[in-house]
Amino acid sequence: MSSALTSAPQRTHELYRHLLPLDAAILPVEERTRLLDRFFATPSGREKPGRFWRMDFESLEPGAHAFDRRGATTFATSDRAVLVCDLATAAREHPRLLARAFARTDLTATKFGALATAFAGSGVFVYVPADHACDEPIRVRLEAPADSAFFPRVIVLAERGARATVIERLTSGENAFVCGAVEIVGEENSDITYASVQEAGDGARTLFGRAARPGRDARIAWACAELGAELAAADISVSFEAPGAEASIAALFFPRASQHVDVVSTVEHKAGDATSETLVKSAARERGQARFLGNIRIAPHAQGSDARLRDDALLLSATAHVDSVPALEIGANDVKAYHGATVGALDAEQIFYMESRGIERDAAERMIALGFFEPAIERFPTGDLRDEIRAAVAAKLT
């Protein structure tokens, strides 16, 4: 065994053994080991188990899952001007391009971002050249086999003035452990929309970090739907490091039965004259549990920042639970910042109004709940994708 894997007592853990076969062209084993050290040493920052929360994030790890069963990562684009390839190909044939975006965000500072990067191997690299606009979405599919550990990574590098939409779908077999990452680096005047739909199988645990770093006058739009898995934890972040940038985050989730969803969004206004908007819609029924933590941080020198956050949660059962925690940290005085959050049941007056028009109660409740999600669904690209999300939400109401 490599000395890099045996220099610390905690490296006797079984997970270190699984680092050895991984592609050194993507990341050397010494760096992977350092990141796995960080995973074990870093607290998750999530809620501890208690009355509502069943998951212990501090002890969460792949365990006995089958590391030797590789998940499927596929991609498709009809645009020949765009480079789309797997990570291994990018590391060998386009190392300079990959290096401009790989691990260029703050993802590895988090517990599960460090774990995802330590095992980075399966994934997709997307490169959009300067001033090129993609007419059709770039489609990425990530699929984890049952009882497997899967560590997918999607990296997007958009040159100056580039425009593209990426649609990612995550599915899995039962009891899969998926720890993945998405990184977007958009240069000056670029415009990237990234939509993700998570529909993992029963008993699956998905932990995903998604981070973007837009350049001057660039635009980033996230649209994320957490629909499957027993446990779905997601971190969505944007860091403004140049003025004039714009970002929007839209997220929706709907835990039911015994599902547990934990979403954290973070917008860092490190440069001034940047605009951000966060919109979250969630519902829970039966014993579904969820938490949303929305962070907006404005640095003292980030004058002219404009940040908005709106989070609405709908409780459809007496046993369901959703926590909403918006948080503002404002260090500058010439800014606009707003946050609002609501948690409640269906509006009795709306139901009564619809019943008075001849609509049965069950149908009325269904229509109101579907309409509740619509502002977030509208943020997803393509009509077909929006219709699929509407159908998935509707299925959770039956």
Image (cartoon, helix red, strand yellow):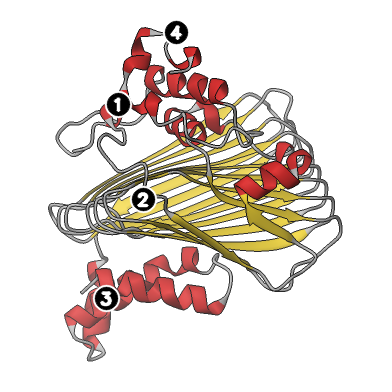
Does dot 1 land on a helix, a strand or a loop?
helix
Going from N to C along the chain, the mark reached first, 1 or 4, is: 4
User: Separation of disc 3 and disc 1 at Cα?
Assistant: 37 Å
Residue 139 visible at all: no
User: Separation of disc 1 and disc 2 at Cα?
Assistant: 29 Å
Mark 2, other Cα within 10 Å: few <14 / some 14–19 / many ≥20: few
Say which residue appears at 20% left-offset and 59% top-offset: 285
Going from N to C along the chain, the mark reached first, 1 or 2, is: 1
Q: Which quadrant of the figure has residue 136?
A: bottom right
Tell me, yes or no, whether the two marked residues, 3 and 4, touch with CB atoms within 8 Å.
Answer: no
Q: Is residue 53 above or below residue 349?
A: above
Q: Nearer the viewer, residue 167 or 144?
A: 144
- Give the residue at mark 2: 342
Residue 40 visible at all: yes
User: Separation of disc 3 and disc 4 at Cα?
Assistant: 58 Å
Does dot 2 land on a helix, a strand or a loop?
strand
Nearest-to-viewer mark from 2 and 4: 4
Amino acid identity at mark 2:
Thr
Q: Position of residue 280 (x, y in %)?
A: 45, 53
